[in-house]
């Protein structure tokens, strides 16, 4: 069955979620929200999922949610960045000088805290360009590594894009190419990456979404996701007559 | 606790003060925000109680705001917030930048009447470089560990939107935003509500309860969150948000303000949007 780049990314992230894990998804993150829901609707029925923006929010504000994260309540969290460096630090703030930016982005939200306190951190980008993967960041919104005297309970699992998966490798934790998506060459990934990228010894090919995954994604996940991210759902899968009726105000 | 009009609410907020505001693409206190713009308030230091959206965007395009204290400002599914982006790229607004958990921690310190609060993470990020009032201390109970601390946040006034108030000033509001915390931290609290009901009709099952102890004034403002949503009452006004984004793309922010904020006031706004 044909699939889009977003669907490949969603399925690749979903497969990494384990049954029974507590998974949290922050603001403006429809791709990880879809991945978390797909995991729960398929191989991880006992995953516990909290998505900011969901209707039945169990916490008092985001304050309690971040407290819950800080005390170690969350196994899996997802972050993105306009720039990601070779060690998985990320920039959600500015391109250019902080005080007089060329491009001002929305800001870091919870990233500067959550990357330290979730057990497994997944970074993702919906595009893969040299400008997005840089040796140096214009602003460090969050980091994936700390000194020993700073509390950090988790680790970076990898960086996921539509064409590749990069994973921290060896002592240094520098990102290496671990998976390429079908039809993409190693050289092409390197060309689209702004920092020097080495290839892991056992490089794998990303598994294509199965028909079953795509079916679940385009039926039950789509329906659940529409309540939180209607515009994203419409842009990815188009509008259906039943959508309006399902929408809860 | 008093029941007041929108106009009276705007007059309770003074030029130059610290104003706390909650909400995102839902539950933003837009009616009060529009009244502040009509009143021509100046030099406000606005603190957003969590990630912010159209509440911030509309204010930032005007001269009401001098300083913003925030963790993230975007229009959610409608993308970048264009006025926020423009004014920061032109360095026209002072910024005090947070991570979402440091705003929550600062407000918690304010609510508890203590001067600061420790927060996990932060160390090694550029927040510690741009915020000279964020510090790293040795944990006094485990000196092997360093931890970041952030100062208390105490807004002079808080404004937020809610579902219901009862006659005694108790509030039911969305649990998705930090409304209760914001109310606890602030010196004066003004709430706009969809409905005013008898105490026995207060729907505690519908959201967070905020006791009247934390509430100064209540404004009856049906549709007061539009064009942002208000769960159980109305969804985001999608058509309006598309109009806004297209107007701003064509550099017609001032024309938008003229049509939807200045001309005709709140009644005509709500009627137009219904």
Image: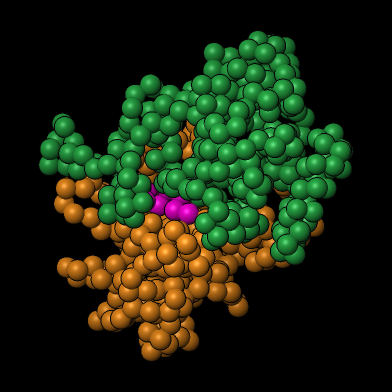
Chain colours: A orange, B green
- Residue B132 appears at what percent x and percent y? 32, 45
- Measured along the vertical axis of the image, is residue A130 above or below residue A45? below
Q: How many marks?
A: 0
Q: Residue at x 64, y 23 (%)?
A: B12
Q: Judge left or right: residue B73 versus residue B107.
A: right
- Measured along the vertical axis of the image, is residue B209 above or below residue B54? above
Q: Residue at x 80, y 41 (%)?
A: B262
- Residue B97 appears at what percent x and percent y? 44, 47
In magenta stretch: residue A113: yes
On the question of residue B12 being in view, the answer is yes
- Measured along the vertical axis of the image, is residue B156 above or below residue B238? above
Report the quarter where the C terminus of chain A lies: top right
- Residue B76 appears at what percent x and percent y? 60, 53
Residue extending furthest toward the left: B144
Report the quarter where the N terminus of chain A lies: bottom right
On the question of residue B211 being in view, the answer is no
Q: Judge left or right: residue B163 versus residue B108.
A: right
Q: Main secondary structure of the magenta part?
A: helix
Magenta-highlighted residues: A107-116
In magenta stretch: residue B246: no
Q: Residue at x 42, y 60 (%)?
A: A98
Location of residue B23 (image quadrant): top right
- Residue A73 appears at what percent x and percent y? 36, 41
Q: Residue at x 72, y 59 (%)?
A: B248
């Amino acid at each position: 069955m044909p699939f889009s780049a977003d669907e490949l990314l969603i399925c690749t992230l979903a497969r990494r979620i384990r049954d029974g894990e507590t998974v949290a998804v922050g603001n403006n993150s429809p791709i990880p929200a879809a991945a978390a829901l797909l995991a729960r609707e398929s191989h991880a029925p006992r995953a516990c999922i909290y998505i900011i923006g969901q209707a039945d929010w169990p916490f008092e504000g985001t304050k309690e949610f971040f407290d819950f994260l800080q005390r170690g309540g969350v196994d899996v969290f997802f972050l993105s960045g306009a720039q990601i460096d070779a060690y998985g630090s990320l920039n959600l703030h500015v391109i250019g000088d902080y005080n007089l930016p060329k491009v001002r982005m929305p800001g870091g939200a919870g990233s500067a805290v959550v990357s330290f306190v979730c057990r497994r951190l997944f970074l993702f980008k919906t595009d893969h360009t040299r400008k997005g993967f840089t040796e140096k960041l214009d602003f460090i919104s969050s980091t994936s590594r700390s000194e020993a005297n700073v509390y950090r309970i988790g680790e970076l699992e990898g960086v996921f894009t539509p064409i590749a998966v990069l994973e921290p490798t060896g002592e240094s934790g520098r990102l290496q190419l671990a998976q390429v998506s079908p039809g993409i060459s190693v050289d092409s990934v390197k060309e689209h990456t702004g920092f020097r990228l080495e290839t892991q010894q056992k490089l794998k090919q990303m598994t294509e979404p199965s028909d079953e995954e795509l079916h679940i994604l385009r039926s039950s996940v789509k329906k659940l996701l529409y309540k939180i991210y209607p515009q994203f759902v419409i842009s990815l899968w188009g509008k259906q007559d039943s959508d309006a009726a399902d929408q809860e105000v | 606790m008093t029941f007041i009009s929108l106009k009276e609410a705007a007059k309770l907020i003074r030029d130059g003060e610290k104003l706390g505001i909650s909400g995102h693409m839902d539950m933003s206190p837009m009616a009060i925000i529009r009244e502040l713009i009509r009143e021509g308030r100046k030099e406000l230091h606005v603190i957003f109680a969590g990630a912010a959206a159209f509440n911030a965007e509309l204010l930032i395009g005007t001269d009401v705001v001098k300083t913003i204290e925030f963790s993230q400002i975007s229009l959610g599914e409608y993308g970048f917030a264009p006025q926020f982006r423009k004014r920061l790229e032109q360095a026209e607004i002072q910024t005090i930048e947070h991570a979402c958990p440091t705003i929550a921690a600062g407000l918690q310190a304010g609510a508890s009447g203590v001067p600061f609060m420790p927060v996990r993470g932060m160390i090694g990020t550029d927040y510690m470089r741009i915020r000279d009032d964020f510090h790293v201390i040795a944990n006094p109970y485990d000196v092997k560990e360093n931890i970041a601390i952030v100062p208390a946040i105490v807004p002079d006034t808080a404004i937020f939107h809610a579902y219901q108030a009862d006659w005694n000033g108790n509030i039911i509001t969305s649990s998705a935003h930090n409304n209760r915390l914001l109310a606890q931290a602030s010196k004066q609290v003004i709430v706009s509500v969809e409905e005013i009901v008898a105490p026995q009709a207060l729907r505690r099952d519908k959201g967070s309860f905020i006791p009247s102890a934390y509430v100064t004034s209540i404004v009856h403002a049906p549709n007061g969150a539009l064009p942002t949503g208000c769960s159980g009452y109305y969804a985001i006004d999608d058509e309006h948000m598309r109009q806004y984004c297209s107007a701003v793309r064509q550099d017609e922010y001032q024309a938008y303000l003229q049509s939807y904020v200045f001309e005709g006031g709140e009644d005509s706004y709500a009627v137009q949007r219904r």
